[in-house]
Amino acid sequence: MTERTNRNLIVFLMLVFTNLIFAQKYLLPNEKLIYGFETQNGKKLVLAKDKNDKYIIYRFGTKNKIEFEFPEKTKASWDKFKYAFYLRGGGIQNEGMDLNYIKFINGNYKYVIYDTYYAVENEMSIGIKITNLKNNKTTDIKGKKSTQKGNLVDFRFNKLLKIEDELEE
């Protein structure tokens, strides 16, 4: 091998190992994205499932580091999440709206992923609200609609999550 080839090989290997060390995958090869977006702060939210429905998983963090993953990747994970929705058609005349929520509790915190549309205001919003259950303080982390992938509406029909009547606002 020439010196130039060796140098190119070393640079290539360094790039590969750097990506392996610093970039964590938000989707594993056996997973399918259900819903995801980038927050206005540049963080990433992903809700994914095993392609064979063995588990559902929530991941949140920076582009290079998953800061929070919930829950364990087991069949019991499906019972940790609940879905709620409300749909009123008819557009502005009927004050139409389409509200979709996925919620779960981890310790003393309730997480609510939301995807909402209000026809009167012609307003769509996505994000996640995190509520401290001890003091009821809520943090609303807004998402960038332009980065949204997937949807929550499928949970109305796919029977993967328990549907609750209690809406979150």
Image: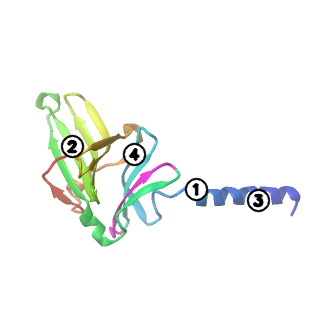
Residue 110 location in percent, x, y? 26, 53
Q: Nearer the viewer, mark 1 or mark 2?
A: 1
Disc 4 packing (10 Å; few <14; some 14–19; many ≥20) = many
- Residue assigned mark 2: 99
State which region is magenta: 52-63
Q: With respect to residue 83, does 115 lie above or below?
A: above
Disc 3 packing (10 Å; few <14; some 14–19; many ≥20) = few
Q: Earlier in the sequence, mark 3 or mark 4?
A: 3
What separation in Å lies between label 4 and label 1 (alpha carbons)?
20 Å
Q: Earlier in the sequence, mark 4 or mark 1?
A: 1
Query: What residue do we see at 76% from left, 59% from top?
Result: 10
Q: Earlier in the sequence, mark 2 or mark 3?
A: 3
Q: Nearer the viewer, mark 4 or mark 1?
A: 1
Residue 39 location in percent, x, y? 40, 42
Most foreground residue, 160 or 135: 135
Query: What residue do we see at 12% from left, 28% from top?
Result: 93
> Hey, which quadrant is residue 127 in on the image?
top left
Q: Earlier in the sequence, mark 1 or mark 2?
A: 1
Q: Is residue 7 left or right of residue 71?
A: right
The numbered dot on residue 37 is 4
Dot 3: what SS? helix
Q: Quadrant of the N terminus?
A: bottom right
